[in-house]
Image: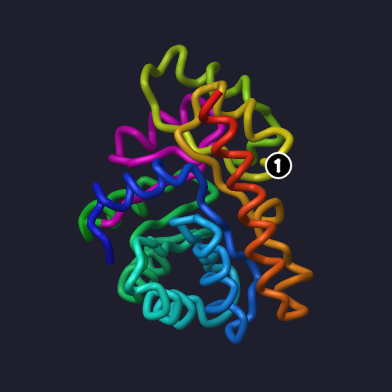
Amino acid sequence: MTAKPATRDRIVDSGVIAVLRGVDEDCIVPAARAIHDAGVDALEITADGAHTAEKIAAVNRELADTDAVVGAGTVLDVPTAQSVIDAGASFVVSPHTDADIVRTCNRLGTLVAPGVMTPTEAVTAMEAGADLLKLFPASTVGPEHIGALSGPLGDVDIVPTGGVSRETVGAFFDAGAVAVGAGGAIIDDEAVADGDFDRVRETAASFLEAVESARDR
């Protein structure tokens, strides 16, 4: 498990968290390797399926000699947070705000990004000690919602996730996002199922190119 400051730096420097949702255990390692080879340093394995802990441990072993950080997403409760951290997750992401999850991650020295949409949720997450705020689902409210939150709340580190595409990623960074989370836009599920990991890498590289272009302008 990577220390909090280094984890945050890798997420922000890369600009994207790749969300691996529903990837089978026998495909998770080559898929993660392909995505990291494309230049994505932050990999989120969602905890809404079987064998999450085993997947996190396996990807950590595969990428142990790299600068990748492997985390867990869709973490809905404290026991799950504890389990994925024990498995080696360097960060924990939730679709909602649960102060107990935030406090558990802080106690265990793990970066945490709870999901928020409203100012109340954002303040609750920040007061509990969240490191990043996951704006979710981002496509529902759009890039302008970042300014709507940061206006009254000040300098908040927001990671829009959910429906972010190559076409919209620029608008989210223009609005003040520190990084974005992406699933379908960065991970070609059909290519994973076909075992075509060259195509997985190419799709991830294409999305990262859009991220880098958006941040350079």
Q: In this rendering, would 185 be left or right of 33?
A: right
Q: What residue appears at the point 62 percent right and 65 percent down from the top-left corner? A: 21
Q: How is the image coloured?
A: rainbow
Please identify the quarter of the rendering in which residue 184 is found.
bottom right
Name the quadrant of the C terminus: top right
Graded by Cα atoms within 10 Å as few (under 14), some (14 to 19) or many (20 or more), the crowding at tag 1 reads: many
**Does residue 124 belong to the magenta stretch?**
yes
As helix, strand or loop, the secondary structure at mark 1 comes to loop
Number of numbered tags placed on the structure image: 1
Question: Which amino acid, mark 1?
Answer: Ser
Instruction: Tell me residue 181's x, y (percent).
Output: 56, 47
Q: Is residue 79 left or right of residue 194?
A: left
Residue 202 vertical position relative to residue 171 in the rendered view, above or below: below
Residue sticking out furthest to the bottom: 26
Residue at the image position 39 percent from the left and 62 percent from the top: 68
Name which residue lies at 70% across and 42% down: 165
Locate the N terminus by quadrant: bottom left
Residue bearing mark 1: 165
Q: Which residues are magenta?
A: 110-135
Q: Is residue 117 above or below residue 77?
A: above
79 vs 188, left or right, is left
On the image, the x and y values in percent for residue 64 come to 33, 74
